[in-house]
Image: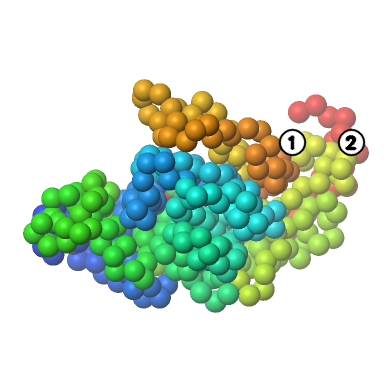
Amino acid sequence: MEVLETGVLSGFRGVAGSDFFGGPQVKSFEQEWSDFVGSNHAVGFNSLTSGLFAMVGAAGVGPGDEVIVSPYTMSASATCVLAYGAIPVFADIDPQTYCLDPGSIRRRISERTKAIIVVHLFGSPAPMDDIMDLAREHDLIVIEDAAQAPGGLYQGQHVGTIGHMGGFSLNYHKTIHSGEGGIIVTDDDNLAIRLQLIRNHGEVVVDEMNIQEIGNLFGGNTRMTEIQAAIGRQQLHKLDFLTKTRINLARVLDEGLEDVPGITPQIVNPEDKHVYYFYPMHFDEEVWELSRDTFVRASQAEGIEMRQGYVRPIYWEPLYQRRVAFAGGNFPFDLIDPMPEYPRGLCPVTEEAHENSLIFGKFCRWPLTSDHALQVLEVVRKVWDHRGELRNIKF
Ligand SMILES: Cc1ncc(COP(=O)(O)O)c(C=O)c1O
């Protein structure tokens, strides 16, 4: 209401000066978010998709560079690379964390590799120590996509703050949201200003701001409004409570699933904090002697909404299969000779996860209570008890 009463719904102007960096709500939100995660800078965006584009640009990625990405994530975490004429190279995931597997990253590094985009999928922290060691060894920039993991900790440190830059999504579906929105954090002053330039037509201010040496960036308008920031500030106060609710529900599900054969919840390293954007499980069709599809349909018939896997491996999408990202040919894929291919089997662990994982979304979040989680477990056991009959049912 305070913002509406001022009538200033966005404080940004694309000219040099204090307004270049946004209005009072955006600046306060950025300060509060950087205090929360313990970073030197936070830069607000209108979405994390915009933020990912900006991070790739700020990293200095250019045409023909390769960026290692995950195939098991929301499409923007891989596709942002193409905006700068660079090529996404898919490494495989680890079946336990669903995040990039450092061994697979190592095998995908080439002389052209410039950066790695690590996703903390489902709120599960990726193995950052090993990834940062690889990055140091090969002089790579590490971008953390912590869209689904605000408040998540890797060995006590906030995810998003371990690589060179990291970003969080504030879209409507996330633990906290501002309708749409994204926020990037970094400790690096140079990266922070580059992110700010890309966010707001940076090309027009570098002379006046006397920062020509980093003025090699074209900007856009990916600015956060005052309304988004004001909502984000209030939402940030609720994050801890909402995350605790998710973790408590996950613990009830973990315990209850211990005596259910053939469903294996994620094992979380006790030193890390998983924030359960989703609650993923592995489903073993051989143990159940039942297809995952039938299991899901039977659970749905009992009122339990469940997803079969998360998304299909990103490289299965036509963009990668046809290698057409822009009008007029195969740019940027054709910058590499021979052009990269994205065949089936490229990332077998991801393909297996896609075929055999189950995801609880709605059952792991406020306003549900442990009673709801117990009901979910009851349904799972009921489906187990009746699996013999279910084999013969046609849905
Ligand atoms: C892993 C991941 N990365 C990036 C994004 C993009 O965030 P936004 O919707 O804020 O653009 C999302 C959103 O769903 C996501 O889940």
Where residue 126 sits: x, y (%)? 58, 62
Q: Earlier in the sequence, mark 1 or mark 2?
A: 1
Q: Residue furthest top?
A: 328
Where residue 12 sits: x, y (%)? 17, 56
Which corner quadrant of the image does residue 275 belong to? bottom right
Per the rendering, the mark at residue 389 is: 2
- Is residue 370 shown above or below 296? below
Name which residue type carries label 1: Asp
Reading the image, the residue beneath label 1 is 293
The number of numbered badges drawn on the structure is 2
Where residue 140 sits: x, y (%)? 46, 59
Please give the name of the residue rendered at 23% of the width and 58% of the height, measured from the top-left corner: 214
Name which residue type carries label 2: Glu
Instruction: Out of 15 and 268, give the one closest to the viewer.
Output: 15
Residue 355 seen in this snapshot: yes
Q: Quick one: SS at disc 1?
A: helix
Q: Is residue 292 left or right of residue 186?
A: right
Instruction: Out of 191 and 21, give the one closest to the viewer.
Output: 191
Image quarter where the C terminus lies is top right
